[in-house]
Image: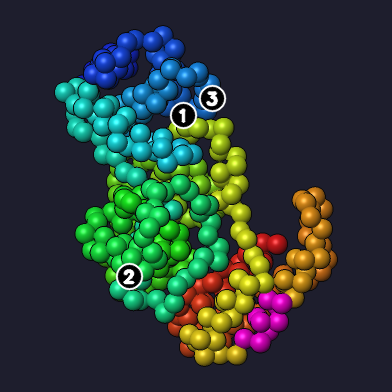
């Protein structure tokens, strides 16, 4: 999109937003906003440290919105905490949009983007999965969610969330208040690895797919550090194409992104895959079952603490055997080139993970 011809000075725009919120001009806030504007225009890195009360969110949101709307350059804003994410979405961005509405060529389009399992799965709610799909590789680390009702049992929680899915437009777990336990949420959601993708009969109604479509069309996309971590591991299509990335709460970026790029593998998790393959595909998985017990033994033998020189020889051997067992299971579950469903998805995930080791 080309320049609209609407002249709006950054300092004036920031003053409009702050005044609308009942605030006063702050030199530090204007200095930061101008630095952000310069970085956006020149596409250069910028690191800002500002104390409490500076008004950091408006200092980057105002230039980001101006740039996105007048130049058609999408900006992604990432936070570490749900609290800040909510503040930006429900308070800060609406305040910027309202205050600048008379001076902008159009209203900024804003989208929220989260990890796959944060959205309900319509296909699973309708009974499309044979059993609860406990996450094997959930690359999206646990996040805070609305508090649950301590007196509500699991069955009541699942029933309530199923009724909610019929009415919600977003399927976003954080919009369900009161919230539900992780166990209840697993009854109505799947990880990206377990998702049927284009094979899903309810693809056109898929909540996470809708969120990703909206993000591809938005001016400003609000996401979290875990998503940045997943994108950094090379996962395609996690984030939409963008011209700029703003990382708020950057002091937590390392830990959050590291968690997102970490997978946990155990003997019991492999045993669950073996049971799924046997139950859903009806094939023999003896080698996979053997690897489950061998992996458990190899992990127990590993000394506590970090492994600066890499995994032990025993663990390396087991992982190599596990990769071969997964490939064998995949071949058995897809004899005619078809799909093996969630069981095959998990075996594929393990095989790829082992290959990276």
Please tell me which residue lies in front, 5 or 94.
Answer: 94
Taking the magenta stretch, the answer to whether it contains residue 203 is no
Give the residue pinned by disc 1. Answer: 43
**Residue at 40% of width from left, 71% of height from top?**
196
SS assignment at label 1:
loop
Distance CA(mark 2)–CA(mark 1) = 44 Å
Residue span colored magenta = 285-293
Location of residue 150 by image quarter: bottom left
In the rendered view, tell whether residue 193 sits above or below residue 229.
below
Residue at numbered disc 2:
125
Q: Secondary structure at mark 2?
A: helix
Earlier along the polypeptide chain: callout 3 or callout 2? Answer: 3
Residue 227 place in picture, x, y as percent: 48, 48
**Taking the image as drawn, is residue 224 in sight?**
yes
Which label number is shown at residue 47? 3
Label 3 vs label 1: CA separation? 13 Å
Q: Quadrant of the N terminus?
A: top left
Q: Are marks 2 and 1 in contact (CB under 8 Å)?
A: no
């Amino acid at each position: 999109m080309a320049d609209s011809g609407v002249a709006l000075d950054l300092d004036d725009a920031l003053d409009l937003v702050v005044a609308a919120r009942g605030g006063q001009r702050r030199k530090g806030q204007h200095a930061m906003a101008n630095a952000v504007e310069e970085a956006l225009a020149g596409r250069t890195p910028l690191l800002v440290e500002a104390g409490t009360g500076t008004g950091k969110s408006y200092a980057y949101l105002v230039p980001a919105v101006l740039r996105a709307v007048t130049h058609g350059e999408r900006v992604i804003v990432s936070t570490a905490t749900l609290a800040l994410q909510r503040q930006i979405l429900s308070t800060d961005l609406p305040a910027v949009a309202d205050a600048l509405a008379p001076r902008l060529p159009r209203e900024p389009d804003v989208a929220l983007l989260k990890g796959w399992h944060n959205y309900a799965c319509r296909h699973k709610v309708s009974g499309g999965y044979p059993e609860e799909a406990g996450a094997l590789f959930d690359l999206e680390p646990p996040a805070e969610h609305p508090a649950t009702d301590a007196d509500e049992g699991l069955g009541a929680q699942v029933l309530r969330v199923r009724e909610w899915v019929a009415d919600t437009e977003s399927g976003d777990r954080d919009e369900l208040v009161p919230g539900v336990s992780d166990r209840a949420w697993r009854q109505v959601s799947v990880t990206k690895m377990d998702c049927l993708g284009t094979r899903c009969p309810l693809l056109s109604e898929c909540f996470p797919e809708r969120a990703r479509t909206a993000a591809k069309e938005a001016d400003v996309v609000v996401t979290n550090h875990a998503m940045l971590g997943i994108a950094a591991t090379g996962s395609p299509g996690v984030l939409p194409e963008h011209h700029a990335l703003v990382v708020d709460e950057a002091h937590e970026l390392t830990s959050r992104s590291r968690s997102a790029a970490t997978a946990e593998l155990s003997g019991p998790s492999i045993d669950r895959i073996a049971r799924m393959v046997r139950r859903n595909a009806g094939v023999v998985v003896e080698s996979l079952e053997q690897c489950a017990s061998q992996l458990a033994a190899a992990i127990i033998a590993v000394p506590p603490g970090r492994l600066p020189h890499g995994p032990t020889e025993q663990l390396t051997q087991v992982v190599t055997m596990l990769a071969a067992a997964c490939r064998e299971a995949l071949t058995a579950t897809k004899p005619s080139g078809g799909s093996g469903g969630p069981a095959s998805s998990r075996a594929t995930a393990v095989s790829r993970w082992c290959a990276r080791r």
